[in-house]
Amino acid sequence: MRDFYPEDMVLRNRIFDAWRSAATASGFEPYDACVVESLELLKRKAGEEIVNQIYAFQDKSGRDIALRAEMTPTLARMVAARQGSLRMPVKWYTIAQCFRYERMTRGRKREHYQLNLDIVGEESVAGEAEVLYTAIAALRAMGVPDEAYKVRLSNRALLSELLLSLHVEEKFHAGAFIALDKKGKIPREEIEQILREEGLTDEACAAAFNLMDIRTLEEAEQIAGADSPAIRRIRELFDLLECYGIRDQAVFDISVVRGLSYYTGIVFEAFDTKGEFRAIFGGGRYDNLLTAVGGKPASAVGLGFGDVVIGEIIQALQLPDVRPQQEKILVGYMHDEQRAAATRLTAHLRGEGRIADLRLRPQKPKAFFSLASETATAAVFIGPDDVASGKARLKDLAARTERDIPLV
Ligand code: HAM
């Protein structure tokens, strides 16, 4: 698990601030829930991969509970519980702490935070476009340039159409998706083994593998047919991304399948352009989850955007923080006799809504200004003469300017 020292919080806050501002600017409403969930809910709803990674335990009454590995089952549970009274579409966001017992590698930790953006009750690709735009707006707010990443997207419904055209029956599709998601991650023989266990014949296995070699939407169209509804949806989404000014950040990639079993339509994952890191964010459309948790049928789309990978990218690329620098005034004083004046001035500055950090004991000017240069943008140091004259000097440390301010 992770400890966040104050210096680590700088990066974390940069990420969280961008998430919150982008989600709020797009009109997503915040929600939250307890990190402890019913094991049954988490197990029933997630993909196999995550189920094996759940931190589960029993409470003192012997109930099976777990630390959530993802937020989506909880979101579905919360929406289903109030489905009758909620205004649709629901457009919600949260920053959720999640736990997964994974092998720890670069980009993967046992604890991470995830921005979750979800829209429930809108079937059209306007939903996909809106969550993608908002995730990209968050990346921009973090100072990540557009060229640094690509959103790779596909449609499970397209893969279904293609599998059907290869005579792979629909009942085998869910298993095939999960296995094909592992392409490039585990050896081909192991994937074939899973596919065979899922009931695919050797011929169908080979055909499924070949599908993963499709490079363009046009190639897919040749197999699926010009009237493929799945391809039409992808094209419609690309058109909307154009309107949002983010078309260049998205590419079609048939190999994006996603490891979670609840996705039913468009799926996507964002990766750094050089392909050095794990996925920045991932998500897609899931049309059956609401009914699976006891709700009424409702189409949903959403994504999860973790703090770990993007933090590594920001650090590796040394991307400068684009947030306006916040003023922070360090207030100090020379002797005990000036403590009252320094304290009153600090309270006054804070009352004006400014950030003021008061030294808690007297200090020599040299030590004070050395600290101020490292921790603040401005400084006021009060000596005996200042108290006598009723004013002090407020120094702007970056601009190297100063002006008098009255003592209160
Ligand atoms: P996911 O792809 O499992 O999707 O996770 C989403 C993102 O969370 C990943 O792209 C990655 O940034 C981050 N992440 C996941 N696991 C870890 C880990 N062990 N360490 C660090 N970061 C991690 C979901 O969780 C879906 N529930 C997303 C979703 C929301 N789909 C619809 N709505």
Image (cartoon, rainbow, N blue to C red):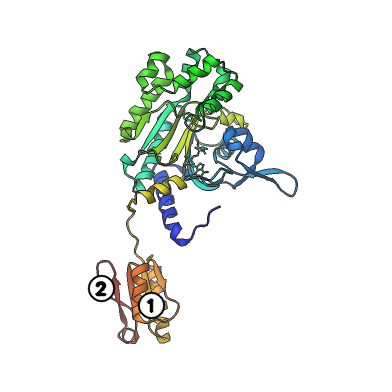
User: Badge 1 local density, few (<14 within 10 Å), some, or many (20+)?
Assistant: many
Q: How many marks?
A: 2
Sequence-earlier tag: 2 or 1 = 1
Q: Is residue 259 above or below residue 314?
A: above
Q: Is mark 1 within 8 Å of ligand 1?
A: no
Q: Which residue is mark 2?
A: 402
Residue lying furthest right in this view? 61
Kind of element beneath mark 2: strand
Residue 213, quarter of the rendered image: top left
The residue that label 1 is drawn on is: 332
Residue 51 place in picture, x, y as percent = 61, 37
Q: Is residue 30 visible?
A: no
Asked if the residue at tag 1 contacts the one at tag 2, i.e. Cβ–Cβ closer than 8 Å, the answer is no
Instruction: Determine the secondary structure under disc 1.
Output: strand
- Quadrant location of the C terminus in the rendered image: bottom left
Dot 2: few (<14), some (14–19), or many (≥20) neighbours within 10 Å?
A: some
Q: Amino acid at mark 2?
A: Glu
